Image (cartoon, grey):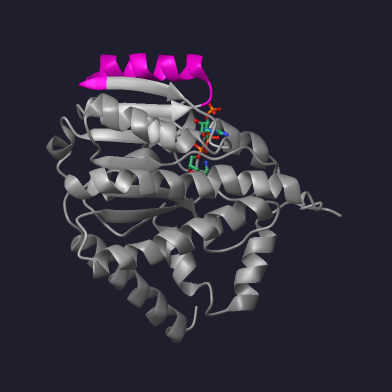
Amino acid sequence: MGPFAKILLLSICVAYIAVKWTAPSFDPESLRGARVLVTGASKGIGEQMAYHYGRFGAKIVITGRREKALQQVVERCLSLGAQKALYIAADMANESEPDKVVDFALEKLGGLDYLVLNHIGSSSFSMWEGDVEHTRWLMKVNFFSYIQMAWKALPSLEQNKGSLVIVSSVAGKMPSPFVAPYVATKSALNGFFGSLYHELALKKSNVSISICTLGLIDTESAMSKVKGLVKAPAYPATEAALNIIRTGATRQQELYYPWFTHIICVIRDWFPPLTNYLIQNSINYNP
Ligand SMILES: NC(=O)c1ccc[n+]([C@@H]2O[C@H](COP(=O)([O-])OP(=O)(O)OC[C@H]3O[C@@H](n4cnc5c(N)ncnc54)[C@H](OP(=O)(O)O)[C@@H]3O)[C@@H](O)[C@H]2O)c1
């Protein structure tokens, strides 16, 4: 490695440590009795978030489509220490459901301190073959339902100095192959909530917005899709979930998990041919 590359790498590491050092510290007690709505919590990262919130003694409402799975998650949350745990089954592709879910949480919890938007509709890990209808459907589930729920919950979050937490992906910042519709929805989330962040700041709003950029996480659904096709390591869902919760509770604007996704996103535009090589080389594909 040449001296320039060494200095560059060292500067990035120093800057990263400085940012981490000055980050606000997380007090789990701040979540005791907090009123939280987590979407997509019947499995995966959302399920793990529900358990963490339960351990911290929060009052939570969770949602997803599968009633039985939601019921089991709720029972476990209660056994872990949640002050309250309720579920509502809803399909976010249905335009009336996002409002219904927020209304349910507001009524049952008496207001909201956290809205954690995490659900995603299912999509394949393959070349795009022109299925516009599926992309339209995915935009409904992964994007339009998010902005609908955020708008519906904002007055209560405003009243309670609350937080809006958006679970996004590194794919929304750095497009990768085989997930074009998914990338479109995550880029839309980053753009929309990035803009809303500034609008709330200009209005001197009480509400914080955190956008969480995740790399590959070892949930069952992600692993079953990328098995044999992606060469990147996967990181634990429970750790990702805890980092998302911390980011919301400390009202930070952004999370990058695992940490190196931040560096990848920062240097993305510096050497496009290198970035393209790394992205394409992380996929096993033989035409
Ligand atoms: N895992 C990764 O590698 C990874 C990487 C980067 C970012 N992320 C982000 O992390 C978040 C969670 O990912 P994950 O891997 O935990 O996902 P997951 O395991 O597939 O869970 C998705 C959740 O969304 C719910 N859901 C699916 N379709 C729905 C619909 N039409 N209406 C309402 N709910 C629906 C599912 O519940 P039902 O089946 O009961 O409906 C489930 O609870 C997502 O925002 C994802 O983009 C994940």
> Position of 113 compared to 102: left or right?
left
> Position of 204 compared to 165: left or right?
left
Q: In x, y percent, where is residue 131?
A: 78, 49
Q: Find residue 49 and report its image quarter.
A: top left
- Relative height, residue 205 to residue 160 (above, below): below
Classified by dominant secondary structure, the portion drawn in magenta counts as: helix
> Position of 165 compared to 163: left or right?
right
Q: Nearer the viewer, residue 167 or 147?
A: 147
Residue drawn at x 16%, y 51% is: 25
Q: Nearer the viewer, residue 272 or 128?
A: 128
Q: In x, y percent, where is residue 207?
A: 24, 54
Report the span colored magenta: 65-84
Q: Find residue 105 and report its image quarter.
A: top left
Q: In x, y percent, where is residue 106?
A: 28, 32
Residue 126 visible in this rendered orientation of the protein: no
The quarter of the rendered structure image containing the C terminus is bottom right
Residue drawn at x 67%, y 49% is: 136
> Position of 146 compared to 154: left or right?
right
Residue drawn at x 37%, y 39% is: 241
Q: In x, y percent, where is residue 179?
A: 66, 51
Residue 274 visible in this rendered orientation of the protein: yes
